Image (cartoon, coloured by chain):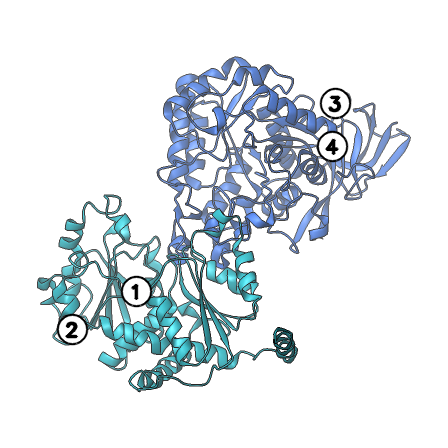
Amino acid sequence: MSILIRGARPLGGTATDVLVDDGAIAGIGSGLSGDEVIDAGGLVLLPGLVDLHTHLREPGREDAETVATGSAAAALGGYTAVHAMANTDPVADTAEIVTQVARLGDRAGLVEVRPVGAVSKRLAGEELAEIGTMARSAARVRIFSDDGRCVADSRLMRRALEYVKPFGAAVAQHAQDPRLADGTACCHEGEVSGRLGLPGWPGVAEESVVARDVMLAEHTGSRLHVCHVSTAGTVEVIRWAKARGIDVTAEVTPHHLLLTCDLLAGYDPVFKVNPPLRPEEDVTALREALADGTIDAVATDHAPHADHDKDHAFADAAFGMLGLQTALAVVAEALVATGRLDWAGVADRMSVRPARIGRVAGQGGAIEVGAAANLVLVDPDASWTLEAADVVSRSRNTPYLGRALPARVVATLFRGRPTVRDGKLVNGLAP
Amino acid sequence: MRHLLSAADLDRDEALAILDAAARMHDIQNREVKKLPPLRGRTIVNLFFEDSTRTRSSFELAGKWLSADVINVSAKGSSVSKGESLRDTALTVAAMGVDALVVRHNASGAVQRVAGWVDCVVVNAGDGTHEHPTQALLDAYTLRRRLGDLADRHVVIAGDITHSRVARSNVLLLRTLGARVTLVAPPTLMPSGVSSWPCTTSWDMDATLSGKAHGDVDAVMMLRVQRERMSGGYFPTAHEYAVEYGLSPARLDLLGADVPVLHPGPMNRGVEISSAAADGRRSAVLDQVQAGVAVRMAVLYRLLSSAAPPAAEDTAARGAVQEVAE
């Protein structure tokens, strides 16, 4: 069945019609017809979004999220591919687990679920996990990360960077020197942590690890990806490394582009994330770095948590917030509304480059005839509010409930098939 | 004021009203029968997630001398490790029909969270390294007894400022009352962003106590240094700390004869405070303990006398339960 998308503006450009047939873009221009028509007048057409950093919690914490519910949240957020982080229970450190996660993604059928493999066995930071077996498995793992924990040991990091080279894979580092910011660190170290009496998480704990890692990437000639950059200092290190020709890419989360550590004043753990929210200066530097391409990608760090893991004192609550359903709107508010990125830029940072970093075939390509029809239609002028009932994740830990947001996802097409229409999951696809 | 969570909840008038009420409460401590009726029929729970002897007994006596029913609930060991959320613990205790929860917790902000969940009055009896407002009130009470009006008085607070809820509450309240505060600590124990606090700071104990650094000193408050910070993490040894920052007999001589010395306790004698300072005529340590009960009586009275009494249907329900039980 063919679908004609009528009157959409590819990458925010001139309106045109786009015909989708048999999972691919079959035509662009006027005079096309399809079995079904999506009226996309005024809507922006982007390549389906690709998330490099998603916690789907399955296996192990299906009460907080499943591959299916996370996939649904992703589709509603305009995503057609997500990378499922390895810190599940059991850890995704074997071919069996990554293959299982990929299979669950296929079964849900809403987005392409690309498992991330652990760098080290059980994320213990001691011995390499079976990286080659995971890379060669049906899940075709191309990103390895101990995310949630830092590969702190310099020698292990060096070996990981070297070892992934034959597979064209990257090591994605959660940069947090565990001696400078231990497990109790939960608030940006600065005026707010001092005033609130919360254990500080200093920017230098991230910056010093990134500085070491880019030097290791240079030394080994390997591909490094830096997860959730949170400080201006890290941006400077990455800018320097790229200028030097080091093969490094980086991501930033939507929340680090919009929210600041001042929000911790009420001790609400919905704002407890790792790395922590930073001051305004860092937020500004991150926006600039995303705009100028120093930071390559927006990645959600979607981190669902059951209420009972958040209903604690701030220091005792779990780290992380939801991100998939609101990421595009937050980027629109932080970057598009401020004139730092146009829609082509959004497509580049949320689809093209992440797909390239994750080596995701058929995603993040140009909107042209013959390309796979992974697409999202966005109403750039919408103002909408996320209500609790709209959250399809198993968890509710989002700070955006009840907050007006710009730019709404109207429709998502995954491999030519609509997963979202009129801002809602297509009938029968809800998990 | 519905709860007392932070010293910042108190404006000058409110703080003075509590301190004046505490003075009246203080008088009954010298009576033979130490009992006043105003909180008869009200129930106060001391919900302590962290060990405490003096603060808990102080609140307990304060409630009992105002004729409230007081029980102590020890919830030690983090609720996280027991699998129960803080919210569940707070709601469970509050559901017993409590008028006030006096909460101490080892995590900063925990008491603020509890106040957001329960309907009753909540008093912060110390949250992590954040605040301890009733300690600041009893310190202010003690200082006023010694010095009179605190306007433009210069109070030095020395010790582990980073991890001190006492310091945070005192800086806020003393400023509200018009005093000047200087914090003294080694750089490793000075909080991040302290330059934005309404106080001056110093790394030099001698220059501060002698008045050379920030002017003549009217009072000194020494803070406890926790044992776990002494193992080389924040300073090399207890010995070096005592040499650099302890209130030694020699440093005592830098102070005027009438300058009071305070310590929230428990004291590490020979580390942050010498016995000469702790037991000398300047020492206000036992005055602070005595003031603690009076100040907490004033706080409980003020919060509970303005809070609505139990709803009529609740009273009826309790009567019914009693009948069934009989």
**Category of crowding for the residue at label 4, using alpha-carbon neighbours closer than 10 angstroms: few (below 14), some (14–19), many (at least 20):** many
Chain ID at mark 1: B
Chain ID at mark 3: A
The reply to the same-chain question for discs 2 and 4 is no
What residue sits right under mark 4 in the picture? A110
**Residue A172 x/y as whole percent:** 50, 28
Residue depth check, mark 2 versus mark 4: number of the one nearer the observer: 2
Chain ID at mark 4: A
Q: Secondary structure at mark 3?
A: loop
What residue sits right under mark 1 in the picture? B199
**Category of crowding for the residue at label 3, using alpha-carbon neighbours closer than 10 angstroms: few (below 14), some (14–19), many (at least 20):** some
What residue sits right under mark 3 in the picture? A371
The amino acid on which the numbered mark 2 sits, given as a three-letter code, is Arg
Q: Colour of chain A?
A: blue
Q: Secondary structure at mark 2?
A: loop
The amino acid on which the numbered mark 3 sits, given as a three-letter code, is Ala
Between A73 and A89, the one lying in front of the other is A89
How many angstroms separate mark 2 from mark 1 (CA)? 24 Å
Visible residue check, residue A152: yes
Do residues under tags 2 and 3 come within 8 Å of each other at their CB atoms? no
